[in-house]
Amino acid sequence: MEIKSKTTVLFDWLTQNKKMCLALILLLILLRFGYLNYYNWHYGNSGQPGVQYYVDSYRYLDGAQNLLQNQPLGHKQAEYIGYIGLLAFAKWAGGSMGAVVVFQVLMALLSAWFLYSMARKITGSKFAGMAAIGLYLANPFITVWHLYVLTESLYTSFVIISVWSIVKACEKRVFKFYILCFIVILTTATIRPNGWILMPIMFSAFILNSSLRPYMKYAAISLVAITFLIGVACIPASNQIIQKVEGSVTMNDLLMRGEVVWGHPELRLSMPEDTAVKKQNWTSSSGYIIGHPFACTKLALCRVSSELLEVNRPWYSLRYRILLFIWLWLAYILAIIGWINYRKETNVKVALWIVLGHILIIALTYAEHEHRFLNYFLPLIYLLSACGVTKLIKMFILPVKLERSSKAFR
């Protein structure tokens, strides 16, 4: 009679008590999530307890006040009309900004459910869903923004819900789901202008999952891309949003001065001179990029690597870099494994497109000091990471278990 090892006994117990184990994992995730929010509320990342505020917070608060007083929004405020509208509603209803951050926390929990649903659907495993929401809700770099009067938390939640709504519409092909999807995407775009990149992705997903012939699909997707580019270049409102980045800084300025991380001139790259570009519309930068492809490619790669890999950031301590390694680099490796094994799944395709869309925005603009731009799509990378770790378990742990079980019956 074969004596079972401790590992085998533990695995047998886990297999026989799946529901209890999953419930325990969920409880630990929620406790971690609750603790992080409790800590941030009482000690405050900004040095003050309670609701947190940052530089951009006052732009949104002033915009909410303008709405309540029937005054026009400023140029930068109009780009965030959805979030400003939420703040205005909270003030109108007699609530404080504390009600807003509570809403953001609840939306984070709701989006976690959608993340769980997608991971489970991709892999057929509840564990994958738990891994996805665990990486998302327990990440201190994401959780810290839930208590800020900023767009970051709510936008991240809606990006997750956007993936779910696009996939659901593709699967159901029913009018009500198309409408629901459009409303979700439009809402996401009004929270932050980054969300407009979801619009062509949504239509492209609809086309790819249609019954059109392959050549017609590619032609239709090309038409969507061209229409989107013409729209952002020719519609005055969108043109102005892209042209003016912050204050008097334009898109051309970012390109010409080699901006890598916003607010850090010491990290800028030296770019070829072209004084004519500075005086023109942002669309003129395409000619500069064509004329200087190597310098512009280097700049784009530096921006993306700085945001995704957190390199060239001397202000980070060793402890902070170790935490980043745990929460980022390992997740990236697992995400690659997940994508390789589940790349044909619609959820995976849409999630990857949205990740690449946000990366493209970083490549064309700049990286951010607090890696906030990464947080917008990091949960989608975690979705792939959860699929990756689930695949590794199926490849290396389950076969060993099955082999041991077969030997026991021989």
Image (tube, rainbow, N blue to C red):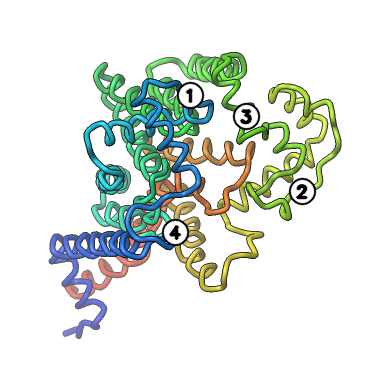
Circle 2: element type: loop
Instruction: Give how far apart the Cα atoms at labels 2 and 3 are.
Output: 21 Å
Which of the two discs, 4 and 2, sits closer to the camera? 4
The residue singled out by tag 3 in the image is: 244
Which of the two discs, 3 and 4, sits closer to the camera? 4
Circle 4: element type: loop
Q: Quadrant of residue 343?
A: top left
Instruction: Give how far apart the Cα atoms at labels 3 and 1 are.
Output: 22 Å
The residue type indicated by label 3 comes to Lys
> In the rendered structure, are the residues bearing label 3 and label 1 in contact, judged by CB atoms less than 8 Å apart?
no
Above or below, comparing residue 183 to residue 403 in the picture: above
Position of the N terminus, as image quadrant, is bottom left
In the rendered image, residue 125, in percent from the top left (x then y), is placed at: 26, 52
The residue singled out by tag 1 in the image is: 200
Please tell me which residue lies in front, 228 or 39: 39
Instruction: Give how far apart the Cα atoms at labels 4 and 2 are.
Output: 31 Å
Which of the two discs, 2 and 3, sits closer to the camera? 3
In the rendered image, residue 401, in percent from the top left (x then y), is placed at: 26, 69
Q: Say whether residue 43 is left or right of residue 25.
A: right
Disc sitting over residue 269 in the figure = 2
Determine the residue positioned at 70% across, 44% down.
259
User: In the rendered structure, which disc, 3 or 4, sits on the residue that comes first in sequence?
Assistant: 4
User: In the rendered structure, which disc, 2 or 3, sits on the residue that comes first in sequence?
Assistant: 3
Determine the residue positioned at 38% across, 32% down.
84
The residue type indicated by label 1 comes to Pro
Disc sitting over residue 25 in the figure = none
Q: Say whether residue 344 is left or right of residue 250.
A: left
Instruction: Give how far apart the Cα atoms at labels 3 and 4 are.
Output: 28 Å
